[in-house]
Image (tube, rainbow, N blue to C red):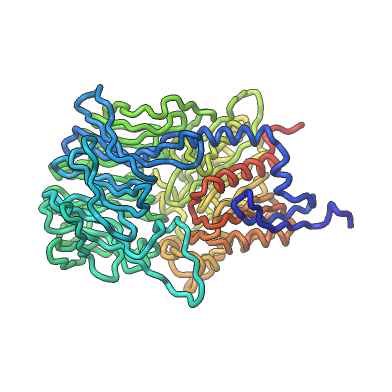
């Protein structure tokens, strides 16, 4: 047997890659993969490195908050390192909207983290931040934002989040998790289990803080993890969403409560039949509203807007059968209308809902991603799109003006994006197509299908962020196709529920039909189509290559290979019950039917696999099982485990390394240009 036919497996640690673990199997060569990666395609690698450096220089805007009188706007901005390095700073900034020529003023510039902007009725600004000297997050209050140093209010240990002023301005509610030093959340790196395994439950409690003394008083019941809250307009109670611990898992079954701000006496309001977010008390105190629906991830909100009496009672759907996905709302002062933002077939809209008539008036609709704050009169937002880097806009609702210009000099190096629509199984499906840059309609180009995470999410136009900025593939000569198949937001709750007990089947059919539509109408080489994704997108990649040989190359990031074993491995198994209808112990067949491993012997597509070492949402064994199967079957595959990373990657070197490897994988297996 000649050496070129011998299987080769390379397993080592490479110090220059922060000790990442690399697994490689290639039946065609015995040259170590990492050496190939380091010494080939140097011009392309340099080009991608430069593009990543340019992206790292973009100012990011993470929060925006409009003052209640509409005269001031605050935002949190991440300032990149001046030397182009990885270090960045988080600052809090305010601007007076009454004077268009006035300069923005710095409120806080102390550390690398800031969050939770909250205005009081009388114009004070609260937020949570750390400093270079103290990495512990603390609550700060600026009495006169931008004019004087903010005051550190608390001296607590643990994780702090979500400050909200009481209506009288005499108290602040916060969410406080004692006993942790890491950032909590299902996408963050899990804490390794060593020794006797047991669930270490750290509860996020609802506490009230006196801003004068900084003294906290926990008021939520013991044993309950609180996810969000809202004050009643008279300040006597807080409505809150909570469940028993562990918090990451049980968000999916959280219920609605209210607690007396003085006594701490809690009352139960609602056990919903869905996931709930964005709990809001009406200004007249009579009603509590929320967004409810099938949500696969905490923080990725979409569904219908529901309301019920504040004392409890029948729940009313305020947006029944609406072919959109509301994702944020707030009451107008009259309590007769609701201002909301919503996903609309891959776009965003701002609209008002009249409660008496049920009619909806769209104020604005566009090809942007939005972070919104304000009311029907004045509001602010963070806007970005395929060709517009993020900036803050503010002013009269519907007539906003750009008020920051931090990224005005940023120019897209990728091609234009276009919304495309097609029909499948009686459904109208939407996605986005990004053109190669430069683009010649007389040529034919390869295409990569990028499947979003979720599945309850969608792809909307936005400027790429550090991590996996897939838009850069456009500058490498590829079309990029971003489908929003059934299960996505943007076309109503029935559409979002379209893959319940049919996980992977109808949604893949939507994607493949979309590929057919694009190939028919655009100069795409049908023999050079690849697929890639992370999380649900990683699962769909693993699933797709077991169902069809249409794809020339694939990248599966943080995927799921075996839903039966996954049920017992992941840290948020509660998300699966609404999708599969029963636990794996009660109905294993419905999980096997949607598991890539069930059909693994069909795979022919070269597949790159990557995952974070401490990913609790899509644990390492899932990627390992898929890689092991492809390895055994002789399918070209490579597997990378990044140390210390969770479902979301934070180490900039890991992000760069992963993206470079994904680019290299598609260049090797599905090059942008081929001799015919």
Give left or right: position of 114 versus 285: right
Residue 267's place in the image compared with 664, above or below, is below
Nearer-the-camera pick, 358 or 30: 30
Image coordinates of residue 40 in percent, x first then y, are 72, 39
Residue 362's place in the image compared with 200, above or below, is above
Give left or right: position of 216 versus 577: left
Give left or right: position of 378 versus 90: left
- Identity of the residue drawn at 51% across and 72% down: 194
- Identity of the residue drawn at 58% across and 40% down: 515
Image coordinates of residue 197 in percent, x first then y, are 48, 75
- Identity of the residue drawn at 56% across and 57% down: 643
Residue 586's place in the image compared with 572, above or below, is below
Image coordinates of residue 419 in percent, x first then y, are 47, 33
Q: Is residue 225 visible?
A: yes
- Identity of the residue drawn at 52% across and 60% down: 614
Image coordinates of residue 104 in percent, x first then y, are 28, 30
Quadrant of res 158 = bottom left
């Amino acid at each position: 047997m000649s050496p070129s036919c011998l299987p080769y497996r390379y397993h080592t640690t490479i110090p220059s890659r922060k000790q990442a673990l690399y697994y490689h199997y290639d039946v065609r060569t015995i040259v170590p993969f990492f050496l190939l990666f380091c010494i080939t395609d140097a011009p392309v690698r340099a080009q991608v490195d430069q593009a990543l450096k340019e992206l790292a220089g973009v100012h990011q805007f993470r929060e925006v908050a409009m003052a209640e009188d509409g005269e001031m706007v605050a935002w949190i901005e991440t300032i990149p390192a001046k030397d182009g390095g990885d270090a960045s700073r988080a600052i809090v900034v305010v601007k007076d909207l009454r004077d268009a020529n006035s300069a923005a003023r710095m409120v806080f510039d102390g550390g690398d983290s800031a969050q939770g902007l909250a205005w009081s009725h009388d114009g004070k600004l609260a937020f949570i931040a750390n400093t270079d000297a103290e990495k512990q997050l603390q609550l700060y209050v600026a009495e006169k934002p931008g004019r004087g140093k903010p005051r550190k209010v608390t001296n607590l240990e643990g994780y702090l989040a979500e400050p909200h002023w009481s209506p009288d301005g005499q108290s602040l509610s916060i969410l406080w998790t004692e006993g942790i030093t890491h950032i909590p959340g299902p996408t963050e790196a899990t804490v390794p289990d060593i020794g006797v395994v047991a669930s270490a439950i750290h509860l996020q409690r609802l506490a009230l803080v006196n801003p004068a003394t900084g003294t906290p008083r926990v008021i939520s019941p013991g044993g309950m993890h609180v996810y969000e809250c809202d004050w009643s307009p008279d300040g006597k109670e807080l409505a809150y969403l909570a469940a028993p611990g562990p918090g990451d898992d049980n968000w999916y079954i959280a219920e609605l409560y209210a607690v007396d701000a003085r006594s701490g006496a809690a009352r139960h309001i609602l056990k919903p039949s869905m996931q709930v977010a964005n709990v809001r008390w009406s200004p007249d105190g009579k009603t509590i509203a929320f967004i409810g629906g099938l949500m696969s991830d905490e923080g990725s909100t979409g569904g219908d807007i529901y309301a019920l009496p504040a004392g409890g009672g029948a729940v009313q759907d305020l947006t029944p059968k609406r072919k959109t996905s509301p994702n944020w709302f707030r009451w107008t002062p009259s309590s007769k209308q609701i201002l909301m933002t919503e996903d609309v077939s891959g776009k965003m809209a701002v609209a008002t809902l009249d409660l008496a008539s049920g009619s909806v008036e769209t104020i604005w609709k566009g090809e942007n991603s939005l972070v919104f704050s304000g009311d029907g009169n004045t509001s602010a937002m963070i806007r970005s799109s395929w060709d517009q880097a993020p900036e803050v806009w503010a002013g009269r609702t519907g007539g906003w003006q750009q008020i920051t210009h931090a990224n005005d000099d940023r120019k897209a190096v990728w091609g234009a994006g276009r919304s495309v629509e097609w029909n499948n199984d009686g459904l109208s499906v939407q996605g986005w197509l990004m053109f190669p840059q430069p683009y010649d309609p007389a040529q034919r180009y390869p295409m990569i299908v990028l499947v979003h995470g979720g599945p309850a999410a969608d792809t909307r136009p936005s400027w790429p962020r550090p991590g996996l900025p897939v838009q850069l593939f456009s500058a490498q000569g590829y079309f990029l196709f971003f489908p929003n198949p059934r299960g996505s937001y943007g076309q109503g709750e029935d559409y979002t529920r379209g893959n319940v007990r049919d996980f992977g089947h109808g949604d893949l059919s939507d994607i493949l039909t979309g590929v057919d539509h694009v190939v028919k109408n655009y100069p795409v080489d049908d023999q050079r189509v690849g697929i890639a994704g992370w999380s649900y997108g990683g699962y769909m990649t693993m699933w797709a290559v077991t169902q069809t040989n249409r794809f020339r190359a694939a990248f599966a990031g943080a995927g799921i290979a075996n839903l039966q074993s996954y049920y017992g491995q992941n840290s948020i198994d509660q998300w699966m019950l609404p999708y599969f209808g029963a636990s794996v112990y009660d109905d294993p067949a419905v999980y096997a039917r949607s598991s890539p491993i069930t059909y693994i012997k069909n795979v022919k597509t070269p597949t790159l696999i990557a995952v974070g070492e401490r990913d609790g949402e899509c644990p390492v064994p899932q990627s390992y099982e898929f890689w092991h199967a492809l390895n055994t079957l002789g399918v070209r595959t490579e597997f990378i485990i990044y140390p210390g990373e969770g479902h979301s990657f934070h180490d900039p070197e890991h992000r760069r390394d992963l993206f470079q490897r994904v680019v290299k994988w598609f260049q090797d297996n599905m090059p942008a240009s081929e001799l015919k």
